Image (cartoon, grey):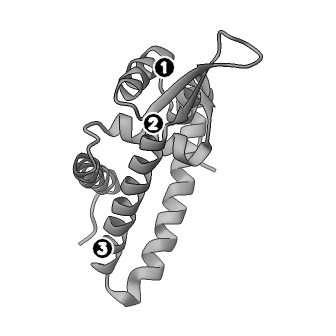
Amino acid sequence: MTQDPSDLLRRITRLHTTLQQHIASCCGIHSLTRCQILTTLGRAGPLTLADLGRHLGADKAWMSRNVDELVREGLVDKQAGQTDRRVVVLTLTPDGQAQVRRLNTELGQQSARLLDRVPQVEQANVLRALELLADALEAECACAAVDGGACAAP
């Protein structure tokens, strides 16, 4: 049975988001936004608030509120920039680094369990399809950033 691609993508997104929220909650992070902030800082290293917002596609005020909560929880450190004191530089604290390690371990285990549910003979095909989908999503996001998403397909 062939499914409507739009419905299938929404279903996958909803289910994956639900599973990620469950893992984040088990690791003590009760917001996917905060999870994304922590994992982005873990991957990218120190970032300005503006750069973090660009990485996550979020406005500065929204990011600032979430970062402030992570600062209060002792997971993120905010410092003024060395060359421009108006710039806020964000880094993970040691507790934040430990939280990201726990989260990445749990998310990695979840991904492995998920792939194990796919028949072995199909796993390579699924991974290739996911790579193609990730590339397509990145291209669509780039278009949305440039002109509101009205880019024509290649």
Q: CA distance from mark 1 to mark 2?
A: 13 Å
Q: Position of residue 21 (x, y in %)?
A: 26, 47
Judge whether 128 appears above or below 121 on screen: above
- Depth-wise, is mark 1 or mark 2 nearer the camera? 2
First of labels 2, 3 by sequence position: 2
Q: Quadrant where the N terminus lies?
A: bottom left
Q: Residue at x 44, y 41 (%)?
A: 96
Furthest-top residue in view? 86
Q: Secondary structure at mark 1?
A: loop
Disc assigned to residue 25: none
Disc assigned to residue 37: 2
Q: Nearer the viewer, residue 42 or 97?
A: 97
Mark 2 is on which residue type?
Answer: Ile
Q: Kindly tell me whether residue 150 is visible in this rendering.
A: no
Q: Nearer the viewer, residue 74 or 153?
A: 74
First of labels 1, 3 by sequence position: 1
- Depth-wise, is mark 2 or mark 3 nearer the camera? 2
- Whether label 2 touches label 3, CB < 8 Å: no
Disc assigned to residue 59: 1
Q: Position of residue 41 (x, y in %)?
A: 53, 40
Q: Nearer the viewer, residue 92 or 120?
A: 92
Disc assigned to residue 113: 3
Asked which quadrant contains residue 74, the reply is top left
Judge whether 23 appears above or below 41 on screen: below
Q: Residue at x 60, y 38 (%)?
A: 142
Q: Position of residue 72 (x, y in %)?
A: 36, 23
Mark 3 is on which residue type?
Answer: Arg
Bin the neighbour count of mark 2 within 10 Å (Cα to Cα): few under 14, some 14-19, many 20 and up: many
Q: Is residue 58 left or right of residue 5?
A: right
